[in-house]
Image: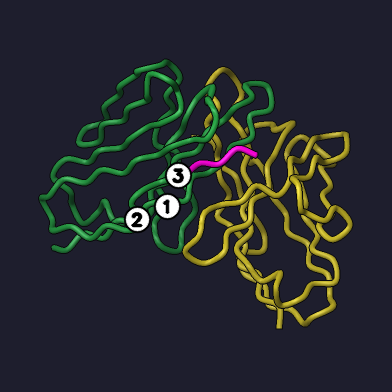
Amino acid sequence: GQQVMQIPQYQHVQEGEDFTTYCNSSTTLSNIQWYKQRPGGHPVFLIQLVKSGEVKKQKRLTFQFGEAKKNSSLHITATQTTDVGTYFCAGSMDTGRRALTFGSGTRLQVQP
Amino acid sequence: GAVVSQHPSRVICKSGTSVKIECRSLDFQATTMFWYRQFPKQSLMLMATSNEGSKATYEQGVEKDKFLINHASLTLSTLTVTSAHPEDSSFYICSAPRTGALNEQFFGPGTRLTVL
């Protein structure tokens, strides 16, 4: 079945440093989404990427979708303590079914 | 944004009992809802797809007789964990996709189940 892996599993940075998490799927995706889950909370939608090679920015966050639509990345510039949480990518193979396969997640800790 | 609620938020039960978890879309209709399970510090694993008016679709390895899903209306799906055992203790989260082209999922706040 489809597998979605993320690296690193965990990253600890000093406030102000940059952070990147990488997502790789074993199969080609129709789209990829990114979610953030704060400790004790539920996943919150950040963004969806659909097109091959797509790049989207949200303030300090930059999202990329690979040319082959099998990998993606999330880059945070100048991290803040509010960025703490686990970041999940989630891929969808079947545009009709809309079910998501979640990546393993990257837990970000930001030291003030 | 769209709101999805879950009830209860936390439940502790004895081994062998059944627990029902409700998932409601509060301000939109959802013909499809998804149920996930999340163990501590792990990712979300899709358990099943709940379809309004028809049978749920279960992922491989998920026992349909143990995790009963009912999607009786366009705003409510229920997950019943039957004859719960300690290994069923987990965080159960439902989600409903936004209608339209964007496949954004709105997640409920989750239900923490502890089976003693």
Q: Which residues are magenta?
A: A1-5
Of all residues shown, which one is farthest toward the left?
A: A16
Residue A85, which numbered label? 2
| Chain-order first, disc 3 or disc 1 | 1
Q: Are marks 2 and 1 in contact (CB under 8 Å)?
A: yes
* Label 3 sits on residue: A44
Question: In the image, are marks 2 and 1 on the same chain?
Answer: yes
* Label 1 sits on residue: A37
| Residue A91 shown left or right of residue A111 in the figure | right
Q: Amino acid at mark 2?
A: Gly
**Which quadrant of the figure contains the C terminus of chain A?**
bottom left
**Which quadrant of the figure contains the N terminus of chain A?**
top right
Protein chain holding label 2:
A
Q: Position of residue B15 (x, y in %)?
A: 79, 81
Q: Which chain is green?
A: A
- The residue at 44%/40% (across/down) is A89
Report helix, strand or loop for mark 1: strand
**Which of pointers 3 and 2 indicates the residue nearer the eye?**
2
Q: Position of residue B14 (x, y in %)?
A: 77, 82
| Chain-order first, disc 2 or disc 1 | 1
Please check the rendered image and state whether residue B53 is part of the magenta-colored stretch, yes or no. Answer: no
CA gap, disc 2 to disc 1? 6 Å
